[in-house]
Image (cartoon, grey):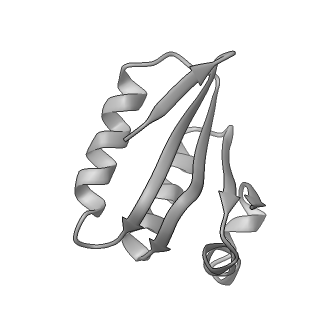
Amino acid sequence: MKHKLEDKTLTIYMEGELNTGNGEGVEREIDKIISQNEFNALVLDMEHLRYLASAGLRIVIRLKQEYDDLSIVKVSEQIYEIFCMVGFQKLMKIEKK
């Protein structure tokens, strides 16, 4: 999983699918990246994420609980609709592509 630390903002680039089958591994990888960096803001870049299941929503909500300054950017229309259905757009900054 690619990531970038710039000006105390950690950006993690999500890609492919985030589902029940790979959610646990993705979460471990995100946690590893987070533990290896000092940052003030966390950004999940979802430009190349094609699919998001409930396992992914669980990861996002946990990250929001742990990191108040969480933003999600470059979200596809389909994934944005999922975030809106569960009310995440009221809890955090979510930007469409």
Please name whichever residue, 77 or 10, is drawn nearer the observer in this view of the structure.
77
Which residue is pictured at 77% across the width and 65% down the height?
90
The part of the image, by quadrant, that contains residue 79 is bottom right
Residue 42: x percent and y percent?
A: 60, 35
Which residue is pictured at 38% across the width and 30% down the height?
33
From this view, report whether residue 47 is shown above or below residue 77: above
The part of the image, by quadrant, that contains residue 59 is bottom left
Which residue is pictured at 66% across the width and 70% down the height?
76
Is residue 41 shown left or right of residue 34? right
From this view, report whether residue 60 is shown above or below residue 57: above
Quarter holding the C terminus is bottom right
Residue 68: x percent and y percent?
A: 65, 40
Q: How many marks?
A: 0
From this view, report whether residue 19 is shown above or below residue 34: below
Quarter holding the N terminus is top left
Is residue 77 shown left or right of residue 39? right
Residue 9: x percent and y percent?
A: 64, 25
Residue 41: x percent and y percent?
A: 65, 30
Please name whichever residue, 23 or 13, is drawn nearer the observer in this view of the structure.
13
Which residue is pictured at 24% across the width and 57% down the height?
24
